[in-house]
């Protein structure tokens, strides 16, 4: 509901003209921005003299805070007392108070609640809300607290103060103690707004009206009874809020814009409260910006700020918080922050003054844009500042015109050539960053080093673009400006929706890669100039867009403007029933897509793209029991010809004999082994059986047939044999052949290295039998790990027709073999995908963590950390289960649980688990996603998971009664017993299960890794 009280007296001469104040938004800085140091003002450069900001210095010349805000003297002349100053610009100052009146007339109960909490709480506590989900983690780790947890019933008559009165608000000896100290240092001895308030003696809004009804009712008891020492300009709350936020943003630059938005919200709440005017809040922001830069630039604080950053990334960003994040909407954040820079004031002075950057201001972007030099960060600040002419903001050094929200989005213009050198090995923003501003100017952009830089703005810079190394992504129609684009050796990625334009020519050298992501038929790369093609062309069709037969235009250019062709072309995402070929035409490059059934074969040389679905764990076949290749079988020798091909045939009589031997077995699995011994010079081994032999082996006569070659072993269960027998013509030929790495993509080559690559096939005459009516084949590839290799990270890969490696997540390494189960035959390789976490290498659960991470089933918690000893939440466990299942959760957009809403990262995983009856909510229809999962809850989810997968848990251990068996809930007892006998869970010390206790991330990794390995045995 809205307040309906009277706010201003008619005697003040201010009328309530509307319910909102409309003003001009801040605009971008004008041309002519300079990164040169501005001349020192009368009080000296702020960063050099900030320690003069003390109460003993009460003049523009002696106190740099009073000096940097001295533009206020163009509007207001202080008097001899708090209530007798002189308005020098009535229109501006009247608007200033009218703004508060209009806000007071329209504020809601929610607005008033926020205003109360911001007013009464410690500002350093309040600023932590900008950390989003990690706010609770930071508060818990640092002991940052507030005693103002709600609005007391008697707040309209009683003033309540926060029991946490410390500027730093937390414990210096905590795990994040340096972050705490950085806040305390920025809010230290030189950060008080009182000297400036006393100097300017500008009244608070309600004193202008002599009417306290402007103030939120619950804050009336907080009104000072000493107005002479209670000036309004600048706002002390705003100053403190920004200082705390700047400290947090330096340590956690990943939340830079969110923290600034929170600071601006806290400042704005002072207007909503009726305690301050817009000019008061602007003054508080400007002084805080200068103070933060000065403190962070001070050499005495160099070690502290680095330690704060390091602690944040080691102990905060590695955690998963549960606090509400109200700052996830980028566009909303940007709009609110930008409006609060000027609060709609008209420009009252020259609007075209060049932007200048204060000395030392670049430190404010030091961790947000660490890959830029100090001079480059100054250029960012210079080209993103607001226009001149606004009240108070045209200080000589430029503090008032800085727009740090915009600066975090990169350059606003290339006024000279810009070279960006990134280093992905350092992680964070060194590895990847996005520039969202609309970049103008005449300069050129050059991308060097590793790492990925994304350009997302409507850019008009004209100096051209050059990619020498790393990746440059273009995410808008004009991301690359209006000049030429040259790719000398990096990767240029097109990710714009619809047409993307290169304003000049496009040239690519032999080592360059152009990646086009085609989301629709409208996604075309338009090149205004010539095309000089070389290197690699990568074309990706995502799952959301499936092209049909015909042609897709990839790029267009002027007639006769194409020179050369791409040396290599790779196409991904085209359905397997199509062939593809890149065709160069007079004014465009198109991708011809033809149906295989109509074309009679591949239409391209090196450009065709028959694809096979990515491998997924196959259903566990009915047969079970250990495979023993030495039980019953036939061994034949095969000589290799001049080309290395070794062929063997087994006659029907031999097959009949071993089949009868198998059928005569009274116990155990009936396994027939067919072994081919080939000469050392063999490169391919084939073994042929007649149709009669296959019939003899199928139809339930044996449980498994094992085909053993020097390069790999195939295990065929009876269901697969039956399918082969039905499809067979006269003969069946099995072949296992070595293959090379020439056709592999660079990423596949990295994963595979020099490890084995095989081409495995089963043929009947001229027909390839690549699938088996839902049946499966187990493949074992011999491999000796290299010294130092973690066997948990050794994986089998399916190599598709484009040379891309697709992981078989069901593969594992044991006893000198890489084993996996597949439902189709093709090209396979042994690969190595070691994902290391700095906090887990020597942990007891390292091998289980490595197993799951290598298969992309789990991820870390940030900054190369896994946090193995941290309790896992219900949502995190649901996500890992979905990963183990290989589930496609992209279609889940809603949840039946009341505490899971659209946009929550865990929604699709929990919805998937709920649909498959793996999870259930509470009686209040809540899932409680961020609550730590108990050990018995985890057992129940695992048991439901195996039931839904149709997997029967083995009983490899005797049943055990835990010491705390009676504490296990009745609904969990059966699940705990089943998992214990399957050796997936075990007790803790003293044979206790601890059913209500939380499970750590490492414990969960062990259970899931063991379960996954069991589920994928043939």
Image (cartoon, rainbow, N blue to C red):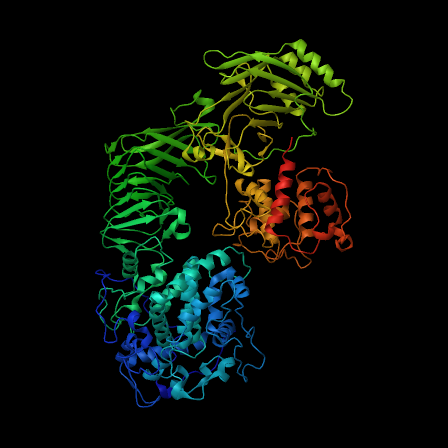
Work out whether residue 348 or residue 974 is closer to the camera in this orientation and state it: 974
Residue shown at the point (28%, 56%) measured from the top left: 376
Number of residue marks = 0
Residue shown at the point (31%, 87%) measured from the top left: 85
Point out the residue furthest to the front here.
787
Picture coordinates of residue 592, whole percent (x, y): 38, 29
Work out whether residue 69 or residue 1005 is closer to the camera in this orientation and state it: 1005
Residue shown at the point (35%, 89%) measured from the top left: 83
The answer to whether residue 641 is left or right of residue 439 is right
Is there any visible trace of residue 888 in the rendered image?
no
Work out whether residue 522 or residue 41 is closer to the camera in this orientation and state it: 41
Up-down relation of residue 635 to residue 928 (above or below): above
Picture coordinates of residue 449, whole percent (x, y): 33, 45
Picture coordinates of residue 493, whole percent (x, y): 36, 42
Up-down relation of residue 847 to residue 769 (above or below): below
Work out whether residue 816 or residue 453 is closer to the camera in this orientation and state it: 816
Picture coordinates of residue 460, whole percent (x, y): 27, 51
Up-down relation of residue 29 to residue 911 (above or below): below
Up-down relation of residue 436 to residue 734 (above or below): below
Is there any visible trace of residue 56 in the rendered image?
yes
The C terminus, quarter of image: top right
């Amino acid at each position: 509901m809205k307040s309906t009280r009277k706010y201003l007296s008619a005697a003040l001469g201010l009328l309530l003209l509307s319910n909102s104040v409309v003003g001009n938004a801040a605009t971008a800085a004008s041309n002519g921005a300079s990164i040169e140091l501005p001349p020192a003002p009368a009080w000296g450069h702020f960063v050099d003299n900030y320690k003069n900001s003390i109460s003993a210095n009460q003049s523009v010349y002696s106190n740099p805070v009073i000096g940097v805000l001295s533009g206020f003297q163009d509007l207001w002349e202080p008097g001899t007392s708090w209530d007798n100053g002189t308005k020098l610009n009535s229109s501006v100052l009247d608007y200033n108070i009218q703004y508060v009146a209009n806000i007071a007339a329209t504020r809601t109960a929610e607005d008033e609640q926020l205003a109360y909490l911001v007013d009464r709480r410690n500002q350093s506590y309040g600023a932590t809300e900008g950390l989003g989900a990690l706010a609770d983690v930071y508060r818990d780790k640092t002991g940052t607290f507030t005693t103002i947890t709600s609005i007391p019933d008697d707040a309209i008559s009683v003033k309540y103060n926060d029991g946490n009165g410390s500027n730093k608000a937390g414990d210096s000896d905590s795990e994040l103690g340096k972050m705490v100290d950085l806040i305390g240092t920025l809010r230290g001895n030189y950060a008080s707004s009182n000297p400036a308030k006393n100097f300017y003696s500008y009244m608070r809004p309600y004193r202008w009206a002599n009417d306290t009804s402007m103030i939120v009712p619950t804050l009336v008891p907080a009104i000072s009874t000493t107005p002479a020492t209670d000036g309004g300009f600048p706002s002390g709350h705003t100053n403190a809020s920004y200082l705390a936020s700047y400290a947090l943003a330096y340590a956690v630059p990943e939340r830079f814009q969110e923290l600034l938005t929170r600071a601006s919200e806290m400042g704005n709440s002072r207007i909503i409260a009726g305690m301050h005017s817009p000019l008061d809040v602007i003054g508080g922001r400007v002084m805080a910006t200068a103070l933060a830069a000065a403190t962070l630039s001070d050499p005495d604080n160099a070690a502290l700020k680095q330690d704060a950053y390091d602690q944040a990334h080691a102990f905060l960003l590695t955690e998963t918080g549960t606090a509400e994040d109200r700052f996830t909407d980028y566009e909303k954040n940007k709009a609110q922050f930008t409006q609060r820079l000027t609060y709609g004031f008209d420009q009252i002075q020259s609007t075209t003054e060049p932007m200048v950057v204060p000395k030392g201001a670049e430190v404010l972007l030091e961790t947000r844009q660490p890959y830029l030099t100090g001079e480059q960060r100054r250029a960012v600040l210079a080209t993103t500042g607001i226009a001149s002419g606004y009240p108070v903001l045209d200080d000589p050094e430029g503090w008032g015109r800085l727009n740090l929200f915009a600066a975090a989005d990169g350059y606003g213009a290339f006024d000279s050539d810009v070279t960006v050198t990134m280093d992905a090995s350092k992680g964070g923003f060194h590895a990847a960053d996005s520039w969202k501003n609309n970049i103008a100017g005449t300069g050129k952009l050059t991308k060097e080093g590793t790492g990925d830089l994304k350009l997302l703005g409507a850019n008009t810079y004209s100096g051209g673009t050059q990619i020498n190394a790393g990746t440059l992504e273009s995410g808008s129609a004009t991301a690359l400006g209006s000049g030429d684009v040259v790719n000398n050796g990096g990767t240029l990625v097109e990710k714009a929706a619809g047409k993307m334009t290169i304003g000049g020519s496009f040239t690519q050298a032999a080592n360059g890669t152009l990646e086009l992501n085609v989301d629709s038929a409208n996604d075309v790369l338009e090149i205004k100039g010539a095309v000089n093609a070389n290197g690699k062309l990568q074309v990706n069709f995502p799952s959301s867009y499936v092209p049909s037969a015909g042609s897709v235009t990839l790029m267009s250019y002027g007639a006769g403007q194409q020179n050369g062709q791409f040396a290599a072309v790779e196409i991904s995402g085209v359905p397997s029933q199509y062939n593809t070929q890149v065709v160069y035409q007079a004014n465009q490059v198109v991708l011809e897509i033809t149906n295989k059934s109509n074309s009679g074969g591949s239409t391209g040389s090196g450009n065709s793209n028959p694809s096979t679905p990515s491998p997924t764990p196959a259903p566990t076949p009915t047969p079970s029991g250990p495979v023993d290749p030495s039980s019953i079988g036939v061994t034949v020798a095969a000589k290799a010809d001049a080309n290395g091909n070794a062929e063997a045939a087994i006659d029907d009589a031999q097959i009949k004999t071993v089949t009868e031997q198998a059928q005569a077995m009274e116990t155990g699995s009936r396994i027939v082994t067919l072994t081919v011994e080939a000469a050392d010079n063999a490169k391919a081994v084939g073994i042929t059986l007649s149709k009669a032999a296959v019939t003899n082996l199928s139809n339930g006569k044996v449980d498994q047939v094992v085909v053993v070659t020097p390069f790999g072993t195939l295990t065929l269960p009876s269901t697969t044999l039956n399918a082969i027998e039905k499809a067979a013509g006269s003969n069946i030929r099995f072949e296992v052949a070595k293959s090379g790495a020439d056709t592999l993509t660079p990423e596949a080559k990295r994963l595979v290295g020099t490890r084995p690559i095989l081409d495995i096939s089963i043929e009947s005459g001229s027909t390839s039998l690549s699938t088996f009516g839902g049946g499966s084949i187990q493949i074992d590839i011999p491999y000796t790990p290299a010294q130092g290799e973690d066997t948990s990270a050794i994986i089998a890969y399916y190599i598709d027709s484009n040379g891309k490696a697709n992981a078989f997540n069901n593969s594992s390494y044991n006893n000198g073999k890489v084993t996996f189960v597949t439902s189709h035959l093709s090209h396979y390789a042994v690969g190595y995908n070691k994902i290391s976490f700095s906090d887990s290498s020597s942990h007891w659960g390292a091998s289980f963590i490595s197993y799951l991470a290598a298969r992309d089933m789990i991820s870390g918690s940030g900054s190369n950390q896994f946090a193995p000893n941290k309790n896992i939440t219900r949502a995190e466990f649901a996500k890992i289960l979905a990963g183990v299942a290989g589930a496609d959760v992209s279609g889940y957009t809603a949840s039946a649980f009341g505490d899971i809403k659209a946009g929550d990262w865990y929604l699709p995983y929990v919805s998937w688990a709920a649909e498959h009856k793996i999870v259930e909510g509470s009686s209040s229809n809540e899932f409680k996603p961020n609550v730590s999962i108990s050990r018995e809850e985890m057992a129940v989810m695992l048991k439901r998971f195996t039931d839904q997968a149709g997997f029967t848990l083995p009983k490899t251990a005797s049943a055990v009664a835990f010491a705390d068996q009676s504490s296990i809930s009745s609904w969990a007892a059966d699940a705990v017993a089943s998992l214990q006998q399957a050796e997936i869970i075990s007790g803790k010390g003293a044979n206790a299960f601890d059913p209500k206790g939380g499970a750590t991330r490492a414990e969960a990794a062990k259970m899931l890794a063991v379960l996954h390995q069991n589920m994928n045995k043939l």
